[in-house]
Image: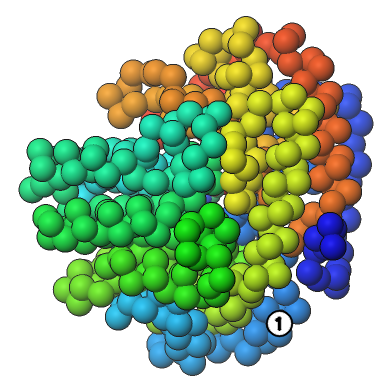
Amino acid sequence: FRTIIEPFRIHSVEPIRMTTAAERADRIAGASYNLFQLHADDVLIDLLTDSGTGAMSRDQWAAIQRGDESYAGSPSYFVFRDAVRDLFDFDHVIPVHQGRAAERILFSVLGGPGRVVPNNTHFDTTRANVEATGAEAVDLVIAEGRDPASHHPFKGNMDLDALDALLTARGADVPCVFVTITNNSGGGQPVSLENLRGVRELCDKLGKPLFLDACRFAENAWFIREREAGQGERDVVDIVRDIAALADGMTMSAKKDPMGNIGGWLALDDPDLAQECRNALILTEGFPTYGGLAGRDLEALAQGLKETVQHDYLRYRITSTAYLGEALQKAGIPVLSPIGGHAVYIDARALLPHLDPLQYPGQAVAVALYEIGGVRSCEIGTVMFGRRPDGTEAPAPMDLVRLAIPRRTYTQSHMDYVIEVCQRLAERAHRLPGYRIVEEPNALRHFTARFEPV
Ligand code: F0G
């Protein structure tokens, strides 16, 4: 059949509150033109993030009832640990409340002044957690990964020559190599198995551990199945296991592919490093068998891990994201191609050529999408990445606006509405104002900065 349906039916519903254009203009001005400062019930379609915003399944809600809240040694921990290990067979599985806690713990041990951490592209919290220790975060994605128009099938791939050069020049300063799958800040683009093998070889040459930032591992594995030679007939579960076998450990936000509303983990093989991380965990997250989560959260994640690798789900997930992206392309809106796994990224710099990157074209598009139709998106560009640790400001490599799609949450008619809103955006793009920042914190400014149109 031509129509790929949502492989579920709706079991409980949440109302969406309709708003008028006048209300929205008032709300966004009141939020100082920062979409993170809006009240969510003033938003019609919330594409701010796919993180923690998905719908849990009947079986996840049932699993929640089984949650055991023992402080230490809860059976729910072992259910969770085994579900993680079924895919990612690392010796030590340490739960945390979300991905950035795993990052903070790992880099508090491996980071520090003088250290340098390579990644295809650091996500904002990953970069911030590396830099908070005084270490340097270096992005080494292939050149195609920085070109919004390139059609490379694995735009998340690491530039192996650049990694080799960095490891040769500064090997002693590199505590580990990271690969983010899929590459969120670069457009939700996948990394190939072949490229991961190449990274592994370089790590072996210099004796460096390889870590995955694996939030969207199932989407990445589906792209491998679809696009990489020889993978088309394989079960996604086996592809995930191949990916895991190439790494020494992982940080994980379970708010993405594992279908959780909260949760994450740090998993690794090195027993000494695991012990140091557990000690850091106990200080702020909790005992190592719950790590800041309730037993019921652990149960929900264990069930979510089983659901996220199902082919019917992944086919629907990737196809429905492409449905939105291809409709925008047809409407003449420049979007990052190929379409990513969890999100469609509008190339705001190309859509608003009259604005300088330091007038934040991504912010201009994100504000306009809200004003026009109550659609909340997220700037991933100069607002998010423009401020350097030394205090200077420079344009980010790209100015993107991400329409992130929560898992199993919106229907095709919701997406048809978003497409209409984007069409109206395109009509008025040439006259959208730029923005300036009137107040910002030292790090991760996009969450709380206040803006003004210019
Ligand atoms: N790594 C990647 C690639 C991410 O996308 C995120 C979160 C994290 C780490 C941190 O995980 O939020 O659980 O602490 N990304 C969300 C997003 C917030 O909207 O893309 P967390």
What residue is rendered at 31% in x and 41% in y? Answer: 159
Position of residue 254 measured from the top left corner of the image (x, y, whole percent): 52, 65
Rendering coords of residue 150 (x, y %): 52, 32
Q: Name the residue at 63% across, 89% down.
A: 66
Counting other residues with Cα less than 10 Å from the Cα at mark 1, is it few (<14), some (14-19), or many (20 or more)? few
Residue 114 position by quadrant: top left
Tell me which amino acid carries mark 1: Asp
Of 429 and 141, nearer the camera is 141
Q: Image point 57% across, 58% down: which residue? A: 226
Find residue 313 and report its horizontal and vertical position in percent: 69, 67
User: Could you tell whether 70 is left or right of 61 in the image?
Assistant: left
* Ligand 1 neighbours mark 1 (CB distance < 8 Å): no
- In the rendered image, which residue does mark 1 sit on? 59
The colour style of the image is rainbow
Q: Which percent across, then down, holds residue 385?
A: 44, 30
Viewport quadrant of the N terminus: bottom right
Does the rendering let one see residue 55?
yes
Decide: is 438 above or below 203.
above
Image quarter hosting the C terminus:
top right
Q: Is residue 195 rendered to the left or right of residue 444?
A: left
Residue nearest the observer in this picture, 176 or 282: 176
Q: Is residue 261 above or below residue 111?
A: below
Location of residue 233 with respect to 449 vertically, above or below: below
